[in-house]
Image (spheres, rainbow, N blue to C red):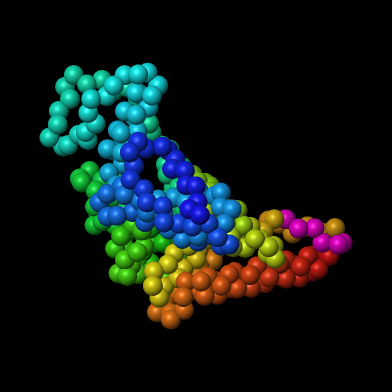
Amino acid sequence: EPPHVQMVPHVPDLETFNRARTGKRNRFGIDRTLDTNHFTFHGEVHRRTAPHWVTVHDPPLLFGRILADRITQGTGIKVAMVDRATAEDRFANAKVLHRVRTHMALVLERCNKHSQNLFAEALLKRMGRHYTGTRGGWLNGAAAVRDFLSQRALGPAAASVTIADGSGLSRDNRITARILVKLLAHMHADKQRGEPFKNSLPVGGGEGSLAKRFTRNIHAKVLGKTGWIKGVGALSGYLEFPAATAPGGAESSPRTVAYCILINDSPLANSQMKRLQDRIVRLIDEAVVLNNRHETVADN
């Protein structure tokens, strides 16, 4: 039988086509026709309750339709028309009813934890706007990032970094694992930006794109940003080791290790690259724990 699918928030007159079926596996998916809000449900559903996120076409206009529906449902006021303003429209007598502003820390968290590529592109262009005072784009956004890297984080090494976009999907991006680890170490020591940056990263066995990875058999808390395009896989972040007490009573200090794994020109599937990354992270984890034990014995 077709599964029951609930769209949240409810949008009046939304076109959906339910071609999915209930079965023994969870392989549910949603396709959206380009430049429309026509959604097709497909795949197989077995006791699925977790949400499945999907992008929408023309968010402002869709929001207007939702708002008009809620006004009518809640007050009985009929909305005659829903339209999206253009750059040429002027509203001299309009009144601002409400403003919503999102703190940058929350924007970063949404961007990094859930790999929101569009957010990353928008952030890069916003940085370019702030940096130059002109219209934001990839070029002045990249200049803003390079200035930060050279002035505050990497010094002359920043000259070897190539920034082609904000999301990392371009194959023209160039950076080394050594430089990324140096940047991670700098952010860890930054008292103003370090904590919000660290909190924006996915957590192994917890939330974000690492929720189903590093769920067991690891000592450290794994924080890491994932990345993938065909033939390329990446995982970079921190391993956070709590203070540990040895049998003799000696205590090792908490320790944070920055790591970066970049895989290029690989014939492996993304799932295989993930398994390789996980294995490397576990080896780092074991090496640090073993080193801590040796230090504790030496202290005793």
Which image quarter: residue 286?
Answer: bottom right
Q: Locate the C terminus and report the quarter of the image it occupies.
A: bottom right
| Residue 103 position by quadrant | top left
Residue 247 shown in magenta: yes
Camera-nearest residue between 223 and 34: 34
Residue at 62 percent of width and 57 percent of height: 205
Q: Quadrant of residue 292?
A: bottom right
The single residue placed furthest to the bottom in the displayed view is 267
Counting from the top left corner in percent of width and height, residue 192 is at 49, 44
Q: Which residues are magenta?
A: 243-248
Q: Position of residue 84 (x, y in %)?
A: 22, 35
Q: Position of residue 115 (x, y in %)?
A: 43, 56
Residue 113 pos. (x, y %): 49, 52
- What secondary structure predominates along the stretch shown in magenta? loop
Q: What residue do we see at 58% from left, 70% from top?
A: 278
Residue at image location 49% in from the left, 47% down from the top = 4
Q: Quick check: can you spot residue 148?
A: no
Please indicate, yes or no, whether residue 292 appears anywhere in the rendered image.
Answer: yes
Question: Looking at the image, which is closer to me, 200 or 85?
Answer: 85
Please tell me which residue is depicted at 29% across the width and 55% down the height of the picture: 33
Point out the residue furthest to the right here: 248
Question: Does 136 appear above or below 97?
Answer: below
Nearest the viewer among 59 and 198 is 59
